[in-house]
Image (cartoon, coloured by chain):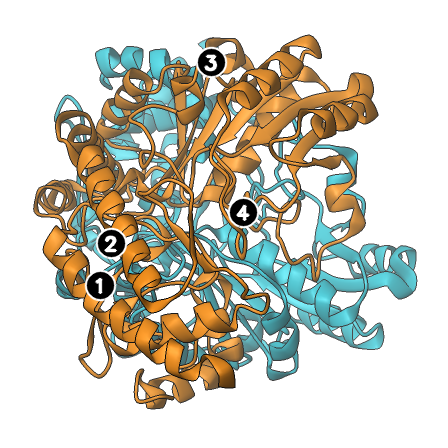
Chain colours: A orange, B cyan
């Protein structure tokens, strides 16, 4: 256990939860010693069951945009809680929230709310098929769009038919997309795209605007819908849909994670032409209409519009990237820091089995900094340059330790 | 608008939400004048946007088991909120919750948590296929198990392959089940069942224990898993899985709605033999590990174990049923009150187009009582005999109005 984490609790967990944990928050792929449970979160910090604190570069795998327990959002949450949350109908706040999203996202003319990101991507798929009367859905190889039957990255327990009409292409490769479009023929309903390529265990690839324009053009030529999955990157790149921002407006986009700054809510928004299809499908969930996460989202969106949170994320992210590069060089390491600075992926050169980055993250974790060796990370709005300086002390120790132990890995 | 509901808000909603609302909380199937939005909920009451109050027999379509804003559950929620909710890992409360469920549900040896009911039913399907290596899933015709691609009751926008291996049988009919089992042959993975038959627009049918034993026997004979979907009825019939209670223990069961008394959380629990398969699949969601709904669920389960809430629901439900029957008779109506008294379905004899029950609910609604003409309702723990007496005043006026206007319907 490396002296970190609550082993008694983890043993109790293994007795009543398969493998002790499941899904993306399992630490099975993380370095040994990564705590599985947290007792507390505040701003940009986490505390484990032994009261050790961590500067958190993971932001709950995305949802924490503005800081844990953000005072203004908590205030909005408490005010709505006193009125009502899960009721026999939604609260008026649902309309405020739909208006806010429609006002902020250029292509959006309507919104529907749900809970998980995959609720939104599945809803997009259903709307696209209902509208076009076609079946084929194109998805970039390796892109994550949720863990429903048709898109889970580990298909154990699913059947071939779940993906009967899902076809794959390579991100950032218009020839590959055109091949897939040809195969779909007159049955092509929609193309899914992510704001930029953010697969696990790989360098991130930022969006090439020409590629985005090409995808939009191909969709138009074939009467197919373009769906952008903003669930992971939404509002960390722009205050609008990121493809709207480069002039390649989609027909539908999926939002989640940050929408309520940690409160459970996701959304599908779309162009006016799809209003009919969106009104014909039947999708729902017991808690999709709950008012508290909507109140949190209204306040989160207000802060997104009115504050300089995005410039702050960019400033902090650039400061971290630049300082880390210098630190790596001074220790003799070549770091690959890829993707937008607000969502960094950090890998090492000449590290085919990920042993170096794993060791480095393990030592940083032991020194109070939560870094991922395989998944992009997330800068959050509560981070200060002081937090980054503190994190850099831990990464400095991690580089030094890695240098001493590299040969033995 | 019949003088009820917030029409300005509904107009704003139609501009930014397809049809103004979607899913099970849309009032499209409800009588005219049913408010679409609620500003407040407390105990067993709702308030609409014009500050009219309603005694709520719908309980948020199930989640409200013990009363809106239940003080002890709210206290647990606030305590966990101050610590953390959606973090980079779950809180220790997740283990407490899994232990509580395993302790209460006879067949449960492990638990996995999610958000929507359909997350749990889809997870059950995937575990069953992963464990058995077979594909066929048997579902009762008309039973609702969520609105994912394979089970949405209105399949607009889905494809035939989504149900390629879903086969149907008639509830409470072992011959029909045996026919479906024969068709599935050696590819039979699992049979879904609900605690009792609670379809919309139909009388409810209580569980026949002999039928339950027959289903269990058939599953055993064919090496198929038995999955009970307790999402709607869980903890309103028993403090255990309802099929465990009649000696027909399932292999998996799905829980949701009431689990956190309105906080968003659902669960899959299973027998020890399925632990391996449950640990192999990949299912997850951004908010599945959030600590606040888990804290609410721990407290809800404690109250379920330690209080007489269930006997109270049964007492209130029987009081309502008996009084309503007498009232109907005195007005010359034959009412069909079906299902468990804690989850009543109320329909009228000789009412093939549902015109009478719709009119009756409309007048009751106008008099401050929220009743459904097509969906089973839910008694909640905050209801008193005084509330029922008040509701009976409204239903009395509704019967009288219906008598006067019946000929014109």
Residue denoted by label 1 = A392
Mark 3: secondary structure: loop
Q: Measured from the top left, where is residue A317 in percent x and y?
A: 26, 45
Q: Are marks 2 and 1 in contact (CB under 8 Å)?
A: yes
Mark sitting earlier along the chain (4/3): 4
**Residue at coordinates 27% horizontally, 41% vertically from top-left?**
A260
Of residue A187 and residue B61, the one placed in the foreground of this image is: A187
Judge depth for marks 2 and 3 and give the one in front.
2
Q: Measured from the top left, where is residue B55 in percent x and y?
A: 23, 40
Q: Quadrant of the N terminus of chain A?
A: bottom left
Judge depth for marks 1 and 4 and give the one in front.
1
Mark sitting earlier along the chain (2/1): 2
Please indicate, yes or no, whether residue A282 appears anywhere in the rendered image: no
Judge depth for marks 3 and 1 and give the one in front.
1
Residue denoted by label 2 = A323
**Residue at coordinates 47% horizontally, 13% vertically from top-left?**
A271
Q: CA distance from mark 2 to mark 3?
A: 42 Å
Of residue B127 and residue A205, the one placed in the foreground of this image is: A205
* In-image side of B376 versus B70 (left or right): right
| Mark 3 neighbour density, 10 Å: few (under 14) some (14–19) many (20 or more) | some
* In-image side of B346 versus B141 (left or right): left
Q: CA distance from mark 4 to mark 3?
A: 23 Å
Q: CA distance from mark 3 to mark 1?
A: 45 Å
**Residue at coordinates 37% horizontally, 49% vertically from top-left?**
A344
Q: Are marks 4 and 2 in contact (CB under 8 Å)?
A: no
Q: Measured from the top left, where is residue A399 in percent x and y?
A: 33, 71
Judge depth for marks 2 and 1 and give the one in front.
2
Q: Quadrant of residue A33?
A: bottom left
């Amino acid at each position: 256990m490396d002296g970190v984490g609550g082993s008694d609790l983890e043993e109790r967990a293994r007795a009543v939860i398969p493998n002790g944990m499941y899904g993306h928050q399992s630490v099975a792929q993380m370095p040994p010693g990564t705590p599985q449970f947290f007792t507390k979160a505040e701003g940009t910090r986490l505390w484990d069951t032994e009261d050790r604190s961590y500067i958190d570069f993971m932001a709950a795998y995305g949802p924490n945009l503005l800081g844990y327990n953000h005072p203004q959002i908590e205030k909005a949450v408490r005010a709505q809680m006193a009125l009502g949350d899960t009721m026999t109908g939604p609260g008026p706040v649902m309309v405020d929230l739909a208006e806010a999203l429609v006002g902020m996202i250029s292509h959006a003319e309507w919104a529907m709310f749900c809970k998980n990101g995959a609720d939104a991507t599945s809803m997009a798929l259903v709307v696209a098929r209902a509208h076009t009367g076609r079946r084929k859905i194109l998805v970039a190889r390796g892109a994550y769009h949720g863990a429903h039957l048709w898109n889970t990255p580990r298909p154990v327990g699913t059947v071939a038919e779940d993906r009967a009409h899902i076809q794959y292409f390579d991100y950032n490769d218009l020839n590959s997309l055109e091949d897939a479009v040809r195969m779909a023929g007159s049955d092509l309903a929609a193309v899914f795209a992510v704001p930029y390529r953010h697969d696990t265990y790989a360098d991130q690839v930022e969006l090439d605007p020409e590629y985005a324009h090409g995808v939009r053009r191909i969709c138009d030529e074939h009467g197919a819908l373009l769906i952008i999955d903003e669930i992971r990157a939404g509002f960390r790149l722009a205050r609008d849909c990121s493809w709207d921002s480069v002039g390649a407006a989609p027909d539908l986009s999926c939002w989640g994670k940050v929408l309520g700054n940690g409160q459970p809510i996701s959304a599908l928004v779309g162009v006016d032409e799809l209003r009919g299809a969106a009104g014909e499908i039947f999708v729902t969930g017991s808690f999709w209409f709950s008012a508290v996460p909507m109140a949190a989202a209204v306040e989160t969106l207000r802060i997104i519009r009115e504050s300089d949170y995005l410039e702050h994320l960019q400033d902090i992210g650039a400061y971290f990237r630049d300082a880390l590069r210098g630190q790596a060089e001074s220790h003799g390491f070549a770091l690959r820091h890829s993707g937008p600075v607000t969502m960094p992926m950090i890998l090492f050169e000449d590290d085919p089995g990920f042993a170096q980055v794993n060791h480095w993250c393990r030592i940083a974790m032991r020194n109070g900094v939560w870094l991922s060796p395989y998944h992009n990370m997330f800068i959050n709005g509560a981070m200060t340059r002081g937090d980054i300086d503190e994190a850099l002390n831990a990464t400095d120790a991690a580089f030094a330790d890695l240098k001493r132990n590299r040969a033995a890995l």
